[in-house]
Amino acid sequence: MAAIEIKGLTRRYGDFVAVSNFDLTVAAGECVGILGPNGAGKTTVVEILEGYRHRDGGDVSVLGLDPAHPTRSWRQKLGIVLQSASDLNELTVREAVEHFARYYPKPRDVDSTIELVGLTDKATTRTTNLSGGQRRRLDVALGVVGTPELLFLDEPTTGFDPEARHIFWGLIERLKHEGVTIVLTTHYLEEADALADHVVVVTRGRKVADTTPAGLGSRSQNLVSVRWYEHDELKEQRTAEPTKFVRELAARFTGEIPGLEVVRTTLEEAYLELVNASEQ
Amino acid sequence: MTNLPSLYYHRSRLEIRLLLRNRNAVVFSMLLPVFLLFIFGSVFNKTKLGNTGVSFDQYFVAGLLASGLLYSAFQQLAIAIPEERSNGTLKRLVGSPMPPSVYFVGKLAAATFTYIFQAIALLAIGHFSYGIHLPSSVSLWLDFAWISALGLAASALLGIAFSNFAKNGQSASALASPVVLFFQFTSGVFFVYANLPKWMQDVAAIFPLKWMAQAMRGVFLPKLFASQEVGHSFELPKAAVILGAWTLAAALICRFTFHWLPKNET
C-alpha cells in the first residue's frame, strides 16, 4: 500500500491558488524530495499531509487516513520536522527529547536518539544556547523519537555548513535503512540527489516534474554545453548531440578550436531550466 | 508510556519547571502582590475603614488575593498561550500524539503553582510584617480553598478564551494588562467597593473579580464588616454561583474559539 496518495489536491488562500490539481504517490519506504522555489506551494502541500492545513479540493490519504481528520493513533506513526521553530527555549536537549518520547507508545531510547543526531555532548545544554544547526538536529531528534513510519522534513538543512549537511545526510540514510518513509522538502538539488529516490518539482502550485534525480538531470533537451572562442568572443551552444556539433565546429576551424569546453548540464542547471520554463 | 494521569503529571512538572526558569515570571508575577502590599501598606498603613476597626491593609490583602487569581491564571495564560502559538510550541504539540487535555492541565498546574506561591508569600509577609489577621477557623480556611479553586478555574478558562484574540505574547500583554488593571480599580481591590460610584459597582458586578474580592473579604475580614458591604453581606453563595457561571461560559468560549495554529497557518 502507498504511504501517501494525493489526487487533484487544490488549496487557495483567498483568490491566490497556492496548490492546483496536485497528484502524488509515495510508496512505503520511499524517500521523496519535493523541490521548488520559495512560495511554490511546497510547505502548503506538506502541511496538508501533516494534518495542519485544510484543503479546498482533492483526495488525500496519508498512512491510510485522510489528514483532514487526524487521530491520535495516526499521529503516533508520524514524525514532523517543521520548517522553523523557536519553542523549547529553556528546556535542555535531553529534557525536550525525554518529554516528547512520553507521547508515543513505542519511543526510541532517549540517549540513543540524542546520539543519532550527534547531540550527546549537548544533552544538558538549554535549547537557547544551541547553534542553528544543533537546534535543527534537535528538531530532527523530536521528529524521530516516536519511531515514526513516515517522517516529514521541511527544509531540514537550511543554514547548515557543508560538513553539518553531510553528517545530516548520513542520519537520513540510516533512517531510510530502517524503512522509514521520508518526505523531504528542500532548496538544495544536491540534497535531493543524495537522498531522494524520487523527486517532484513544484512551481506556482503545480507539479512540473515527477521523476528520479537522474531523470530530472536528463529531462533537459539541451543537455550539454559546448563553449569556445570565436573572433575573441565566448560562444556557447547547448545541444543534445555534442559529438555531432563538435565535429561540425572542427570543420570550421583549421587546427585547434580556441578554448573548447564540453560541459554536461548539472542537475541544478536542469532544475533551473525547468523552473524558469514553467514560470514563464 | 501514554496513560493520561502520567502525562498530566509530567506536563505539569515541565510547565512549572519552565516557569521557574523564567526569572521575570518569578519576580514580577509571583511577587507582584507582595510589592503592591508593600507600596499601599506604606501609604495607608494607619487608615481604618469607617468605624469597623478594619485596617486598609486587611481589606487590601483580600483584594490582592483575588487579584492574584487574575494574575496567575487569567493574565499568565492570556499572555503565555499566544506566545506559544506564535513560537511554534502549540504547532509542535498538536502535531504530536499528545491528548489536547494534557496541554490545558499543564497550564492550569502552572497557574495554580503561581497562585499558591503568591498567596503564601503575601499571607506570610502580610502576617508577620503588616499584622494581617489570618482566618481563625477551619471553616474559613475551607472557604478560602474553594474560593481559590473556583476563582482559578474561572480565571484560567477566561485567560485561555482571551488568548484566542491576540496575535502574539506582546500584543496579548498589551491587551490583558489594562483589562486586569481596569477591574482592580472598579471591583474593590484598590478602593473600597462600597465607596465607588453606583454605575461602576454595577459594571464590576457583572464580572468575576468583584465576586472573588468580596468572597475573599468574607474570609479575611471580621463578620461585622459585612454590614459595610453593598449587599450588607459577603454573599458567598451568590459569588459561587456567579463564578461557576463564568467558568462554564468561559469553557464554552474556549470550546468554540480555541485554535492551536496561527490563523494564517491552517
Image (cartoon, rainbow, N blue to C red):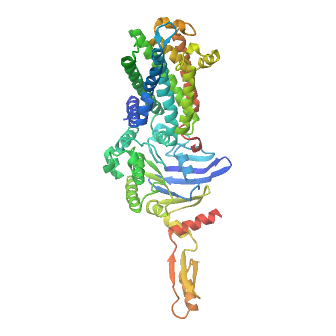
Q: Give the x, y percent position of residue A88.
A: 42, 42
Q: Give the x, y percent position of residue A150.
A: 45, 48
Count of numbered circles on the image:
0
User: In this orientation, which residue lies closer to the viewer: A45 or A154?
Assistant: A154
Q: Can residue B157 be seen in this view?
A: yes
The residue at 40%/43% (across/down) is A146
User: In this orientation, which residue lies closer to the viewer: A132 or B196?
Assistant: B196
Image quadrant containing the C terminus of chain A: bottom right
State left or right for residue A280 relative to residue A222: right
Q: Can residue B244 be seen in this view?
A: no
The residue at 50%/77% (across/down) is A263
Please identify the quarter of the rendering in which residue A200 is found: bottom right
Q: Give the x, y percent position of residue B12.
A: 40, 31
The residue at 42%/43% (across/down) is A89
User: In this orientation, which residue lies closer to the viewer: B46 or A171?
Assistant: B46
User: In this orientation, which residue lies closer to the viewer: A26 or A238?
Assistant: A238
The residue at 58%/14% (across/down) is B195
Please identify the quarter of the rendering in which residue B96 is found: top left
| As drawn, A260 above or below A199 | below
State left or right for residue B134 relative to residue A43: left
Q: Which residue lies furthest to the right in this view?
A: A15
State left or right for residue A252 relative to residue B142: right
